[in-house]
Amino acid sequence: MDRPLLSASLVALVALSFFSEVNSASFKLVNKCRYEVWPGILSGANTAPLSPTGFALKPGKSRTLSVPKSWSGRLWARTLCTGYSPGNFSCVTADCGSGKIECAGGGAKPPATLAEFTLNGTNGLDFYDVSLVDGYNLPMLVVPRGGTRGGCSPTGCLVDLNGKCPRALRVRESGRGSVACRSACEAFGDPQFCCSEAYATPDTCQPSAYSLFFKHACPRSYSYAYDDKTSTYTCASADYVIIFCPLPYTR
């Protein structure tokens, strides 16, 4: 006796499930800090926003998000957040200004350690980095998993810089000491530090003593606007683990 054929709707459902799986990546966000953090996510222009755009992540917990293969954007972790009633939520570092746990299109207020991604870009490669151009608020590590080509190297900043950064860059919170480290651009507003005006090209904007502080501490991270050569990494068809407060690693 012939077996019944799969219904057209079931075939379509299986095909859709397969298509969705191969056309998406995953971001696993892991909190290894000793304190709660609130990840925030901002999608790039002409990129579908991820959902949620912000959430709480307790110490030792993780959360995995499905990400479209051609997604671009950035993510970060907010710290020292309070005010869970609507419109009153705010964070001492990396606040996105929405007044809510979800950032809803708001970016991180500097200083903030940022993980930046452009998936399925030139030649089908993912481009990713950890940036300290907008300052620093906690250690972060990005680890590709299952990539098919490209270097697929981990990158990030594993060092706690909050108590070590130059005094002029420190963000202090009463009773807590230094809780973040500003960029020289934010601290001083000088075009030479911001790579703007007469310093808006790779030839005219050079590393400063302040950006070199970040680079020496975190050599794989972006330290200023034109730090591409030693700070941008590539992989193809990978999933990514983003770890807040990772343990030191060598590779």
Image: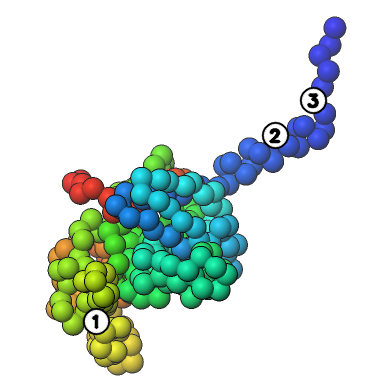
Foreground residue among 170 and 236: 170
Instruction: Give the secondary structure at mark 1.
Output: helix
Instruction: Give the secondary structure at mark 2.
Output: helix
Q: Nearer the viewer, mark 3 or mark 1?
A: 1
Of callouts 2 and 1, which one flags the residue occurring earlier in the amino acid sequence? 2
Instruction: Give the secondary structure at mark 3.
Output: loop
Kindly identify which residue carries mark 3.
6
> Height in image: 34 above or below 214?
above
**Residue 54 image label:** none
Kindly identify the amino acid type of the residue bearing the numbered disc 1. Answer: Ala
* Lateral position of residue 69 relative to residue 115, left or right: right
* Lateral position of residue 16 relative to residue 231, left or right: right
The colour scheme is rainbow
Tell me the distance, in whole angstroms, between the alpha carbons under discs 3 and 1: 63 Å
Q: Quadrant of the N terminus?
A: top right
- Residue 148 position within the rendered picture, expressed as x and y whole percent measured from the top left: 41, 41
Kindly identify which residue carries mark 2.
14
